[in-house]
Image (tube, rainbow, N blue to C red):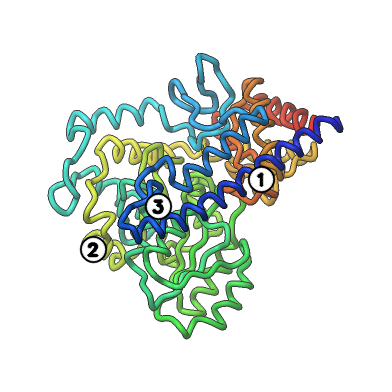
Amino acid sequence: MKKISTMKGQLKDKLIKKALEQKLRYAEQGRSGDNEFKAGKIPEEHYKFRLHPGFQKLLILNEGAKNLGVNNPFFKLHQGIANATTKIGEKEYINFASYNYLGLNGHPGVKEAAKAAIDLYGTSVSASRPVSGERPIHRELERSIANCYNVDNAIAFVSGHATNVTTIGYLFGSKDLILHDELIHNSILQGALLSGARRLSFPHNNWTALDAILSQQRTQFERVLIVVEGVYSMDGDYPDLPKFIEIKNRHKAFLMVDEAHSFGVMGKTGMGIREHFGVKGREVDIWMGTLSKALAGCGGFIAGEHALVDHLKFLAPGFLYSVGMSPPVAAASLAALQFIQREPERVTTLQKRGELFLRLAKSVGINTGNSAGLAVIPSIISNSLKTARVSAALFDQGINVQPILYPAVPENSARLRFFISCQHTESQIQNTVKLLAKELGRL
């Protein structure tokens, strides 16, 4: 064992040395590039993607993983619908890597709705919605979403990530402040960057820290936006929403809640964190969600008052200059929403399966962080190499779970992330936790 550890240490030193050499080479290229610029020449690294620093870094990481005997765990080819089970390379796996939380992707009724929309409208609306891409299915979907939140209206975008980017990027500007949880999704950060607003983070779920920041900073800005998530996609926990509502009201700020992983998951009937806490829809200024999780489609939505939604429909660049949502996608998400409302037992089962996984994992000493057991449950291993190896070992035993590695999370937070589905059986969960504990024990 000592010899193996020594070999790993030597390899790590070699990779660090190589990275430093690469960094020095970039510096030398920069200096030589300056000289070439003066001579009227353009250095190759300025017009060749193979010399881009990001690609070079990727090559180093891939080489390091290969030398350590770790296969690339990403871009696995699924050969069918990914539910609680999936087929990869002609082999069936218990699947914890898809957020088909309510099993509605692939549901016969959802598929039929999408097929009917193709027959009626085709596969594309072939224009932006303000120009000539508006279809009745868009409006029906948006009305249904607005009704779920008991607010005036909603707007559907073709991308969940772009929903946050274009909404925040358009509504806020250089005289404004955006305050967000330190674990907020990348799309929020990109939207804040696009807006040009001042951006500050507060400690995870810490509403007292947010209150303190606002007490000091609020009067220095025009508009202030607070952004939290319903269920955090890496940790599986959620904020104390009533506290954040109270703070935003007291400081006269806007509050945005990203429900990508909480709509269809939280609340007695799956209506999200609003239902979970029993708050009124109008108490939150901007409700955001995605169609790609519980709603079995693709895209995102914003729900709120007329002034917010109408403003975005006519002027938000990511909506105004984008083709309208594909009719079969809109129809699939609308049908999925109707099934959620007609079959609340899907939500009940999902919550029970999540609670079971969390309870069993904790009972055998697996570090699940602050997860509430609502669809997203991490196994925090705190080392990227070990995390990748456990993922590979489980895959060899018929369990598909993705590793979340540095730099997606800090190195000391590397983890396996388990997405739970209402279609997972109790025995699948029991077997998975047993094998996970066994592999963690090997470390």
In this rendering, the answer to whether 30 lies above or below 377 is: below
Mark before the other along the chain sequence, 2 or 3? 3
Q: Secondary structure at mark 3?
A: helix
Q: Secondary structure at mark 1?
A: helix
Q: Nearer the viewer, residue 203 or 52?
A: 52
- Residue labelled with disc 1: 16
- Residue labelled with disc 3: 148
Whole-percent x, y for residue 426 in the image: 65, 28
Mark before the other along the chain sequence, 1 or 2? 1
Position of the C terminus, as image quadrant, is top right
**In this view, which residue lies farthest toward the right?**
2
What amino acid does circle 3 point to? Cys
How far is disc 2 from disc 3 in space, using C-alphas? 25 Å
Total count of labels: 3
Q: Secondary structure at mark 2?
A: helix
Mark whose residue sits in front, 1 or 3? 1
> Is the residue marked by circle 1 packed among few (<14), some (14-19), or many (20+) residues within 10 Å?
some
In this rendering, the answer to whether 157 lies above or below 364 is: below
What amino acid does circle 1 point to? Ile
59 relative position to 197: left or right: right
Residue depicted at x 21% and y 61%: 314
Whole-percent x, y for residue 85 in the image: 54, 24
Residue depicted at x 71% and y 36%: 11
71 relative position to 153: left or right: right
- Residue labelled with disc 2: 315
* Residue 349 seen: no
437 relative position to 155: left or right: right
